[in-house]
Image (cartoon, grey):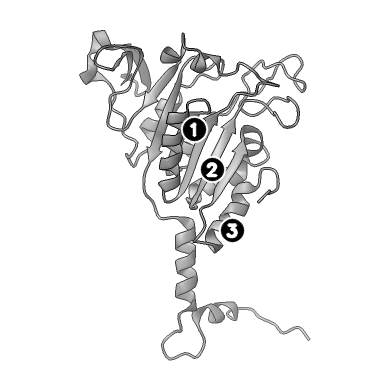
Amino acid sequence: MHSIHGRAPSIATGIATAREDLSVWVVTGDGDALSIGGNHLIHALRRNVNMTILLFNNRIYGLTKGQYSPTSEIGKITKSTPVGSLDHPFNPVSLALGAEATFVARTIDSDRKHLTTVLAAAAAHRGTSLVEIYQNCPIFNDGAFDAIKDPDTKDHAIIPLEHGQPITFGTRGTDGHGDKGLTRSPGGSIEVVDVAQTGLEALLVHDAHHPDPSTAFAISRLTDSGYLNRSPIGIFRQIQRPTYDDLARQQVTDARATAEGSDTDRLTQLINAGDTWTVV
């Protein structure tokens, strides 16, 4: 279904609530999802509607020929910002975690194996799944993801997240771990350390299933908003919470149940309750 620009999560909410038998997917971009559709997106996430949202982030308005978007870096030269963007960009993963989304992930369009794994997990999740997909736009923003795609730099730019594993990146040793890792700083933030100096036991172990999204949010803040020289990739959060559509359908079922000793169901009673009038 081709929906109104930016309003896809709202239309998908109605479909998911009315049709439990359907697998509902939303395909959106950084422009419509985070600007005109930002309000619709955050409320779908907080309600935990059973849908999968694919947010293709190319950090530009590609379909409308190259204006800056809500994820474009400060100083971005585009047709609508000829002397550079002044807007501070959104971090879509941070935004989703702040909205209490139950499944939040990030992957890369050109990494087929990782993309497939993340999408499979998102599709299997009961509730709202948001997957940010870094997608290059060769026409209007070519090279925006060079740091995480170039073989010479990607190992140091990508911070892979695997549930239950210490978070490392950089040059891989014989044990499979990188020479850089993440730890908690005394102030509570996440900082990058040399594994050789701290040891693996001091590193942060990724827990995507933790009910509190604070650590996942802190990890998401490592993403730099410039050339993406550092970017965590993987499933940030994956928890279970009742879904909006399941709860709404149960309310309707309960309301339709006939009250004891009554000839009318509760839904009819609710409709006819309070101030009513007859139009003649």
Could you tell me if residue 208 is visible in this image? yes
Q: Specify the label residue 212 is tagged with.
A: none
Q: Quadrant of residue 81?
A: top right
List x then y, in percent, for residue 192: 36, 15
The residue shown at (39%, 32%) is 216
Report the mark closest to the observer, 1 or 2. Answer: 2
Classify mark 3: helix, strand or loop. Answer: helix
Residue 71: x %, y % from top left: 61, 27
Residue at 56 percent of width and 16 percent of height: 226
User: Which of the two discs, 1 and 2, labels the residue nearer the N terminus?
Assistant: 2
Residue in the picture at 66% in, 43% down: 6
Which residue is tagged 2?
53
Q: Amino acid at mark 2?
A: Ile
Amino acid beneath label 3: Gly
Determine which residue is flagged by label 3: 14
Query: Residue 104: percent from the left, percent from the top?
Result: 45, 38
Q: Residue at x 62, y 35 (%)?
A: 29
Tell me the mark number nearer the camera, choosing from 1 and 3: 3
Q: Read off the residue under disc 1.
A: 93
User: In the figure, is residue 238 to the left or right of 32?
Assistant: left
